[in-house]
Amino acid sequence: MNLWLIALPFAGLILGWMIRWLFARFQLTAAENVAERTRQDAVREAEAEKKAILVEAKDQIIRDRNQLERENRERRVELQKLERRVMQKEENLDSKIEALERLEAALKSREKALDDRDGALLGKEEQYRQELERISGLSSEEAKRLIIQTMENEAKRDAQILINKIDQEAQLTAEKRTRDILVTTMQRIATDVTAEVTVTSVTLPSDEMKGRIIGREGRNIRTLETLTGVDVIIDDTPEAVVISCFDPVRREIARVSLERLIIDGRIHPARIEEMVQKVTKEISQKIYDEGEKVVFDLGLHNMVPELIRALGRLYFRTSYGQNVLLHSKEVAVIAGLLAAELGLNREIAKRGALLHDIGKGVETDGDQNHAEIGTELVRKMGEDPRVVNAVGAHHNDIEPSCSESVLVQIADAISAARPGARRETLDNYIKRLENLETIAESFSGVDKAFAIQAGRELRILVNYESVSDEQAKELCKNIAKKIETDLRYPGRIKVTIIRETRIVEYAR
């Protein structure tokens, strides 16, 4: 009994292990069966997919083959059409060549007939010419010269008669007509004259303000001069300082800024910088407004902003005490009136006159004069070629190409020469011209010197025997340097040396 009780657990364990083994064996068999069925299904699906792919590939090959055959048929049809067209053109070309050959043969026969006829005519002409020479007693060349000389003398006589008649009529009417036009135009002009110089005085409330303007160790005055580009002169003049600058726009900015700083009372570098920036913006706007106002007053249109701004800068420039913007406006009005009297284009005359000094309002570092700068500017801005020529020719730097350019020259001279327009007196003007001629005549080899174009050009005649071409070039440079050193003048002066050889003989 004890043995049985001992063996019973072992028998249970063995039985449990056998049951688990049988169950595992059953599961393994079932899994193998499932795997086998899965493999068979996959094989069947792969075979079916393979067949479908093969069928689709065969269908695609058939479709491609049909498409290729259809394209080949279409190309063959097109080639056949092209071949028929080429053959037809060849036939037409052959027929045209035959027609041209027939025409060429006909032309050759006509040409031969014409040559024979020309030969016969030349023979008859020579026969007639010999007969005429025998009758007249003159050769053909002598007769030809006689006829030409007779016709030339008659033409000269008729031309001289016509010239004398025109000259007499012009002398009778031109002077009176010109005087009437100029007087009428000048009577209709009345403008104010503004005189300014290159320095501006600013009034101070007290001499104590000079110290505040200078600042500690001069930092205030240095800041103002650096920001505006002017020279602030503080001297013994009571309750006043002087602002000096060649650029009138910078001088105006400095003047307004200093006046506002004096009124405000706060004068230090930061406040100076703030005030100068603010005034600079205001002056820039005023420049544009002044230019726009003049353009509007003259009734001109389509003026680009760059030209308007350059015109506005002329408001702060003067020439011999005459405000350049007012001078330009006055010249435009005069040119418009002259153009109306003469029946010319008023728009072109007024635009050319208004823009003739535009080069003075352009900021540039080049050595060109204001006429050259203005010409380049208006050309870039797309102005009419006649306006461009008027700007470049108003000081005869280039030749006038239209009547409006000549009107601008006349109007410019009227505006500058009328009484009270400019500050320079006649004595100073004559003295400046004499100084130019004296400087030129002080050089060896100079025969005569002439200051022309209101002192803008110095024309010099030199002795051709004592001055060679190379020496003339060097002499021209030396005279120009001498003028730059000894004289003060606006703009620039053109120095021209003329060296020529003249041989004179008298027939007695």
Image: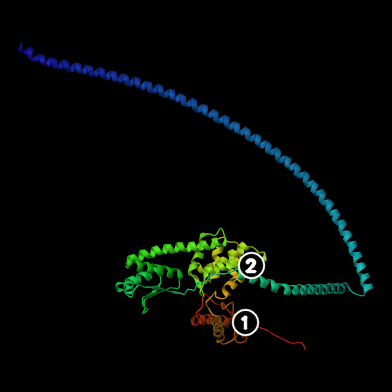
Q: Position of residue 206 (x, y in %)?
A: 34, 74
Q: Is residue 492 above or below residue 56?
A: below
- CA gap between label 2 and label 1 equals 40 Å
Amino acid at pointer 2:
Leu
Please identify the quadrant where the N terminus is shown: top left
At mark 1, the secondary structure is loop
Relative horizontal placement of residue 457, taking residue 90 as reference (left or right): left
Residue marked by disc 2: 338
**Image quadrant assignment for residue 354:** bottom right
Q: Is residue 500 above or below residue 398?
A: below
Please identify the quadrant where the C terminus is shown: bottom right
Q: Residue, x 55% and y 29% (percent of image)? A: 63
- Residue furthest toward the bottom? 508
- Residue furthest toward the top? 1
Marking on residue 355:
none
- In the image, 23 versus 289, the foreground residue is 289
Amino acid at pointer 1:
Arg
Q: Position of residue 104 (x, y in %)?
A: 81, 51
At mark 2, the secondary structure is helix
Q: Residues within 10 Å of mark 1 (few under 14, many from 20)?
A: some
Q: Position of residue 413 (x, y in %)?
A: 59, 73
Marking on residue 499:
1
**Image quadrant assignment for residue 252:** bottom left
Q: Is residue 410 visible?
A: yes
Q: Position of residue 314 (x, y in %)?
A: 50, 68
- In the image, 475 versus 46, the foreground residue is 475
Q: Is residue 391 visible?
A: no
Q: Residue, x 25% and y 17% (percent of image)? A: 26
- In the image, 323 versus 465, the foreground residue is 323
Q: Residues within 10 Å of mark 2 (few under 14, many from 20)?
A: many
Q: Residue, x 8% and y 12% (percent of image)? A: 4
Whether label 2 touches label 1, CB < 8 Å = no
